[in-house]
Amino acid sequence: MRVKEIKVKKNLSVDELIKFIKTANKFESDINIRGANFSIDAKSIIGVLTIVRAGIDVTIITKGDDDEEALKAIINLLI
């Protein structure tokens, strides 16, 4: 399991949102994004669309065989 706290630095455009979801779904690992009052599955377009926006602090948690690669890929899309 990998855990990393970050501040989201950008809002995702529609194209970036689609890329984010496709990237998350490439990995076998579970990928969760947690904030002060929420926890979402990073593979869920509805969850990501409603929660992830610039300026919020989140914790990204990945768990599985490819968790390190998944964590790096998701972080790169948010900062």
Image (cartoon, rainbow, N blue to C red):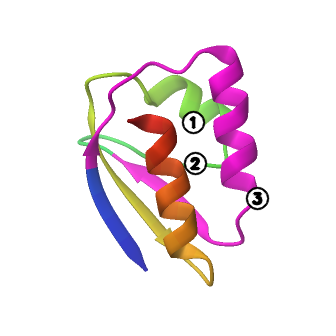
Q: Is residue 54 left or right of residue 18?
A: left
Q: Which residue is mark 3?
A: 26
Q: Residue at x 76, y 58 (%)?
A: 26
- Select label 3 or label 2 by which is in front: 3
Q: Which residue is mark 2?
A: 42
- Select label 2 or label 1 by which is in front: 2
Mark 1 → mark 3, Cα distance in angstroms:
17 Å
Q: Residue at x 73, y 30 (%)?
A: 18
Name which residue type carries label 3.
Answer: Lys
Q: Position of residue 74 (x, y in %)?
A: 52, 50
Tell me if mark 2 has few (under 14), some (14-19) or many (20+) residues whose alpha carbon lies within 10 angstroms of its own.
Answer: many
Q: Which residues are magenta?
A: 6-34
Q: Is residue 32 magenta?
A: yes
- Select label 1 or label 3 by which is in front: 3
Element marked by disc 3: loop
Q: Which residue is mark 1?
A: 47
Name which residue type carries label 1.
Answer: Gly
Name which residue type carries label 2.
Answer: Ala
Q: In this picture, is 22 found above or below 51? A: below
Element marked by disc 1: helix
